[in-house]
Amino acid sequence: MSVVVLAAGKGTRMKSRLPKVLQPLAGRPLLAHVLDAAVALEATGVTVVYGHGGEEVRARFAAAAVEWVEQAEQRGTGHAVQVALPRLPAQGRTLILYGDVPLIRPQTLRQLVDVVGDGRSLALLTLELADPTGYGRILRDARGRVQRIVEQKDGSAEELAVREVNTGIFCVPNALLHEWLPKLRNDNKQGEYYLTDIVGLAAAEGVAIHTLAVRQAWEVEGVNDKLQLAALERQHQRNNAEALMRGGVTLLDPARFDLRGTLEHGQDVEIDINVVIEGQVRLGHGVKIGPNVLLRNAVLGDGVVIKANTVIEDSEIGAGSDLGPFARLRPGSVLGEGVHVGNFVELKKARLGKGAKAGHLAYLGDAEIGERVNVSAGVITCNYDGANKHVTTIGDDAFIGTDSQLVAPVTIERGAYVAAGSTITRTAPADALTICRARDQKSIPGWKRPVKKK
């Protein structure tokens, strides 16, 4: 089976410089969703017919396993398939899809392909609408057999009263496409070559025409303007939310949740309002996500708690850790078990060992931080010298006092105690107090760490 995706439309009503098939739905181009469906069908070949903004479209999908055919002049859907015809084998079947119909489900397409089988017949998806305005109508004879499809601009009043419409999605034997497409004519009100005219040719030759009715209109709806794009976005997110809830996830308000990638989850996961999931995210058992959180390419272990307004990108969070509110983890951050990262703490390419704490108002970039380290408010790892990034290393059980600057490359050894307000430029030795406040840095051997009062 081959797949041809028609993606040459300009999308004038989008009023955008971005080609229509590159308009985003759930954070990905419309065309990407259609290609996903084609891949799920394990098609032997996928051909994309492109036109407006073609080079930009091809560049966006440079890694996709598709063949590209240019429709330099848009002269209708029949003409679009004609330009792809040389790429189609003489035998087999071809499924015709559209680059601006993003929510078509692979299971629906499989049913359509199965209806055709290997015989001399064709199949099309249909839909019944209360208001079919704008769609081509399916015209049947007295015995219910499909005879032809009439477009909105070419139909009579009686024909336009029909509520069964054509979705444009066909599955046709290649031999018939090679036979029929050269016969298409453009003697209609739009002066275009309609792909739907092959239905009339099939009926005239006695070829069996099968139809498969779609139950959900959103599955075959196309996108022509930003209103329709927004409507399909919300439908897609409703579908995602329902699937997650059926899988055991608690969404406090399914209408205020956005999945723009893939989400794997354990049991007893709870997600509050306005959470956005992007890329590939994996949540362990018992994870709780607060409101207004962004997770992008993140792995969260069991029992992790993410408080409100936290952003996590390309990072891993160990079991039992808690973050936020208003924390930010930039790419490359890795947290061990039971780590606490509080409000207005920013991490970048930082590794925090088991039980480490950074309570508030700190920046830790390019840092290797050991277990049970306490990072106080206002601490900064000065990792950038204007040209290169440098690493700060902090050993286990170290304490970094408030408003300290650690000028990398620098090492804070195990059990070291850095006094508040210090600017550290040299190694702070183990189990000693290091202080640097408007005077030379010095270390105090034998200094005893404060002990909590009972």
Image (cartoon, rainbow, N blue to C red):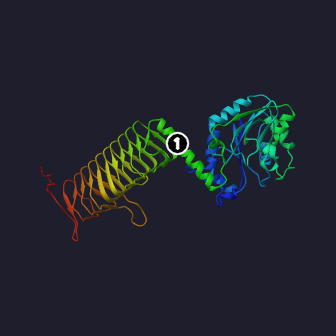
Task: Decide if residue 138 is on the left or right side of residue 249.
Answer: right
State the count of labels. Answer: 1
Q: Residue at x 40, y 60 (%)?
A: 389
For label 1, the SS is helix
- Tell me if 352 is positioned left or right of 67 in this view: left
Q: Is residue 257 visible?
A: no
Q: What amino acid is found at the position of numbered circle 1 in the picture?
A: Asn
Q: Residue furthest left?
A: 454
- Indicate the position of residue 219 as horizontal and vertical percent values: 63, 42
How packed mark 1 is, by other alpha carbons closer than 10 Å (few <14, some 14-19, many 20 or more), is: some
Residue 240 visible, this angle: yes
Position of 434 with respect to 211 (left or right) is left
Tell me if residue 192 comes above or below residue 15 in the rendering.
above
Q: Is residue 269 above or below residue 408?
A: above
Q: Residue 376 or 169: which is nearer the viewer?
A: 169
Q: Residue at x 43, y 65 (%)?
A: 387
Which residue is under mark 1?
240
Q: Nearer the viewer, residue 442 or 205?
A: 205
Coordinates of residue 434 in the picture (x, y in percent): 21, 61
Q: Is residue 274 left or right of residue 33?
A: left
Q: Quadrant of the N terminus?
A: top right
Q: Nearer the viewer, residue 435 or 79?
A: 79
Residue 365's x, y, as percent? 37, 57
Expressed as whole percent of the image width and height from the top left, the position of residue 345 reads 34, 57
Identify which residue, 285 or 273, lies in the foreground: 273
